[in-house]
Amino acid sequence: MVDFKQRLTDDNTEPNTAFLDQLRNNLPEFFTKDKYVIDDMGNEVLVEAGGFDIQKFQERLRNHNINEITDGYTLNFVGKKYAELQTGKPTGTVVIPDMNHNREVNNAQSENIFLTGDNLDVLKHLQRAYTNSIDVIYIDPPYNTGDDGFTYHDRFNLSDEVLRDTLSMNEEEIKKLRILDGRSSHSAWLTFMYPRLRIAQQLLKDTGIILVSIDEHEYANLKILLDHVFGENSYLGDLIRKTRSSANDSANGFNQQHEYVFIYGKNAQLSHLHGETKDQSKYKNPDNDPSGAWVSDNPSARSGGPNSSFKITNPKNGHVDVPPVGRYWAFSRSTFDKWVESGKVVFKDEVKDGNRGFFVKKYASELKTTFNTVNSLFGTDNKFMNQVATKYLRDEIFDGRDYFSSPKPVEFIKNILKYSTDKDDLILDFFAGSATTADAVMQLNAEDGGNRKWILNTLDEKTPDKSTASKDGYLTIDEISRERIKRSSEKIKKEYPEIERFDDGFKHYYVKEIDANTIDKIIDFDPNSIQILTEDVVSEFAGNAVRLGEYYEKSDKDKVNKKFANVVDTGASGEDTILQTWLINDGYKLDVAVKTLELVHHNVHYVEDGAMAYIIDQFTQEDVEALLNLIGTQQLNVKTIIVFGYSFDFATMTSLKNNVKTTLDGVRVEVRY
């Protein structure tokens, strides 16, 4: 749960924090109990988290005759320890709802989500509410080609001493880690990708699938990284996509025309792909067979044995059949006799020379699946090339304007989603770029009547100076991405005027760091002091000046290059931002229904299913009494009252706690700062 003061001052993250959290969620029986104490304010405080009982775990393995792995290889690279630390390190960002956008009619009821911000921070917020919730993840990460703009940037706000003590790094390792900043090396790319894929793996359902586009520059490293994160047995295959027809003369005389899409299942036993629907038009039932429509099937097989090499005599005319040379019957004698009795085998009245004297029916009802397998080479068609995608965006979406370089073809993404999703699935893309994934999902829904939902995330990366996008007033890439979604949805509705159910909207959120002024107030505030608050901390979280395109000068990464900075008014109050950040980190999805109740002077927000109430705005004694009366008379089903500590003076806070304790059985108060 988000306590901003604790997050900013008491970060006890270790390299194995994320791994232990995953073990705790999946194997709670192997953890010792957490230890709590009650502080002076009456709050229950965790003093020691339960640890993993390795001896108990090993004993269970031995009891079930499970051998531990004794050898193998591991993935190592400069920055791995730091990447592991980043995986479990809490984010210092808040979730700011774009209220002006989200209030629009088609967005208010939408289940689609667009998040603007650094995807590592976004994934950490999603982790609290969407773990084991995502059906399919598709990402198109930086390829680290050397000219695609990828460089690894990190503030590295850990001292050398902390790196030595926490990560057990020596001086040489620390030096190499520091050098990664601003670089595009293989190690820098792996350090960047590792924590994102680790969290992505947790977000997937057990039946979930992840698809990752890549080219030859990081192909080998990505394969090893995905094996490391998801497990070698989770590899389902990879696709080939043709990117171009020809290339200029190259130094080595080789023309690279394709790239790849790796496919992994969270659990390969449960994950599955399904290709195009099988053509069953050839299945007929001319003889009114009670088993249904059928086609004639090949009765021979490549392999077999003595039991599948017998002679078959046609009882109608004495014609004798044996398997073709080098082949066997695809059945045993006993099976064949049963098929004859059931009518699955039909003997011919007349047999011409060289023909077989019988045929075997294959019933449509015997098909194991109504889908073909997915062809790994389906993407080699010219319609999936980069130039086709560029032309589509320019001519059909953006009125002849070129805004994106090398966008993914919507037809290709639509196909891989058709092969990996069912009609009600949730799809995540946290390298959303030109928002092709959203367009593909909407087109697929329009075609097959599905209700797939999407979550997209991209950085508010500044549009290049003097670019067409910049000249047309787009400061950041995410602005163009959202505009593409709006235009695509309008195009789809025109093409499918008869469509009844179509989600053409989306909710939008910014994920941003807390302002420095707010951080100072949070850190300096002493919640144990008896004082009347004079500072309005809530308003510090307002989204009326969200900074976009905020990038750092290479010469001094601690100073914002102000010529890149811009602001947008989302219409979000500080209360809106705090509430949204709390909700998702308390495990509520971004589309959860939240009710707001006006008391005497201020509001209380509550989620009925979760029996939780949130008090953020400054409360008075009259508000406390009104709230307690509603809960006491069961007009409000609340078991936990969560309070923003800065909004209460000492007397009002004490009154709330004492009254809840004495009058409301089973209700607790949690104070956050």
Image (spheres, rainbow, N blue to C red):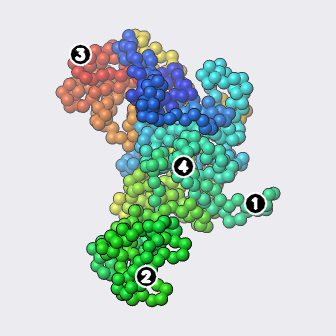
Q: Amino acid at mark 3?
A: Thr
Asked if labels 3 and 1 touch by Cβ distance under 8 angstroms, the answer is no
Residue at image coords 63%, 33%: 80
Tell which of 398 and 411 is nearer to you: 411
Give the left or right position of residue 551, taking residue 342 as reference: right
- Residue 235, horizontal then vertical, whole percent: 54, 49
Asked if labels 3 and 4 touch by Cβ distance under 8 angstroms, the answer is no
Residue at image coords 46%, 14%: 526
Tell which of 462 and 110 is nearer to you: 110
Q: Earlier in the sequence, mark 4 or mark 1?
A: 4
Question: How much space separates mark 3 and mark 2, taking CA atoms?
Answer: 94 Å
Camera-side mark, 3 or 2:
2
Residue of label 3: 662
Q: Which mark is residue 320?
A: 2
Residue of label 4: 235
Residue of label 1: 254
Q: Earlier in the sequence, mark 3 or mark 2?
A: 2
Q: Amino acid at mark 2?
A: Val
